[in-house]
Amino acid sequence: GAVVSQHPSWVICKSGTSVKIECRSLDFQATTMFWYRQFPKQSLMLMATSNEGSKATYEQGVEKDKFLINHASLTLSTLTVTSAHPEDSSFYICSARPPGGDYGYTFGSGTRLTVV
Amino acid sequence: AQSVTQPDIHITVSEGASLELRCNYSYGATPYLFWYVQSPGQGLQLLLKYFSGDTLVQGIKGFEAEFKRSQSSFNLRKPSVHWSDAAEYFCAVASRGNNNDMRFGAGTRLTVKP
């Protein structure tokens, strides 16, 4: 149980285009999901906290207009990278915390974005 | 400010040797504590976590970690390293409570010599 599915696993897009990444909680409802970015050989940096039915909370330095987050249902959050540039190429990972006493965080398998 | 520190960027150990990866945190109160492992190009795998209770936590793959409140540390250990343990290891913390975000340390890359 407590599975988070992330799609796509990898995507290549042209500069200037937009890319949408989906994060789904398969067997639990997630009122909150988290989006991270990881550059090669670096750690995971929290980008934003996605809240179902309300606006996302972005970390300092993350452009809200470039990284659009929509959490329209209790099982789906999307991250759209708008007008992508090569410097947006990265590994994006989502996570959620299933309700209950386990207090664990479940991570998606990540999306490798390459902008050419 | 809240932070989690992994002082060692890269560690090399011989196969069969013991391992200790360091993690220190700075939070207002004792947070939830985690260790994750990541192989190249892969997602994260949870090794173990600490919420409360026994300060020595057992995880998967023979790993354990000890929470030391006085030192604000949560070091990861393994008595005998296997070549398959070569990977990136991340210490992570999350504030207690519901729906609080998780923050990661910079990571420690483990190389295992034959």
Image (cartoon, coloured by chain):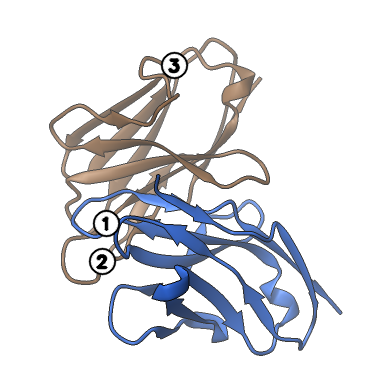
Q: Which mark is residue A103?
A: 2
Q: Quadrant of residue A87?
A: top right
> Could you say which quadrant of the image residue A28 lies in?
bottom left
Does the CB distance between marks 3 and 1 fall below 8 Å?
Answer: no
Chain the render paints blue: B
Q: In this rendering, do the residues under marks 1 and 2 share a single chain? A: yes
- Residue B63 horizontal side relative to residue A53, left or right: right
On screen, residue A104 versus residue A114, left or right, reads left
Residue identified by numbered label 1: A97
Amino acid type, residue under disc 1 in the picture: Arg
Establish if A87 lies above or below A16: below
Chain letter of the residue carrying label 2: A
Label 3 sits on a secondary structure element that is: loop
- Quickly name the residue at label 3: A82
Q: Which label belongs to residue B39?
A: none
Residues indicated by labels 3 and 2 sit on the same polypeptide chain? yes
> Tag 2 or tag 3, which sits nearer the N-term?
3
* Mark 2: secondary structure: loop
Q: Secondary structure at mark 1?
A: loop
For the colour brown, the matching chain is A
